[in-house]
Amino acid sequence: MESLSFLPWVGDKYHHSRFGVKVLVLWASHYAEGPVSREFTQQVVRELGIEGRHRSFIKIIKILLNIGRGYISDDEKADAWRHVAFYNFVPDIVGTSRSAQPTAEMWERGKPQLLSVLEKLKPDVLLVLGCKTAEHLPELPSNMAVAKINDPSRVAYKDSHPAFQQALSEAGHK
């Protein structure tokens, strides 16, 4: 993965996850001020997903764990991140806030890097977050189940659980 702009987050239990299959969560892009390292994705998951209680990262875990609107403890949240991988499609910092949008060129640059991540991690399930992310996907391996849901900032729990649960079921029967 030497050619990747950002290294994916890979939980230490990814290969033997609680889901019975390998799950890669794919979101769109990063936002930051100033230069960042190749480990930025890993840093974001640690700071916002594990150590923090960022609303969208909490929603991702609730979708993964099929919790809905219930409370999730810090221990449950941290443990869930150990069982998945996480990657952002766009290989660039898009801007300083979510109001900035990836350009067509950014999406295109992301395709070969995403395919490299898929080849290396070999997920059984790809959980795609956001319509824009889904629109730009390259041709994916046929042996991978895909769940496409709304961006977590806009997601309704009741609409997202079934898509992910269906993908888990499909992957478990392959």
Image: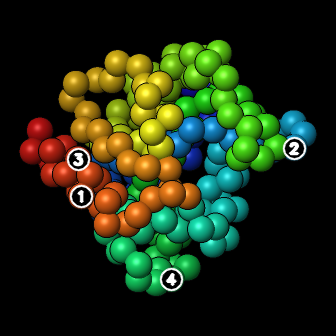
| Residue that badge 3 annotates | 167
Numbered label attached to residue 33: 2
Q: Choose mark 1 or mark 2, whichever is in front.
A: 1
Q: Choose mark 4 or mark 3, whichever is in front.
A: 3
| Residue that badge 1 annotates | 162
Give how far apart the Cα atoms at labels 4 and 1 are: 23 Å
Residue 41 in view (yes/no): yes
Label 1: element kind: helix
Figure check: 81 above or below 92 = below
**Mark 3 belongs to which amino acid?**
Ala
**Mark 1 belongs to which amino acid?**
Pro
Q: Tag 3 or tag 1, which sits nearer the N-term?
A: 1
Numbered label attached to residue 73: 4
**Mark 4 belongs to which amino acid?**
Ser
Label 2: element kind: loop
Q: Where is the N terminus found, in terms of image quarters? A: top right
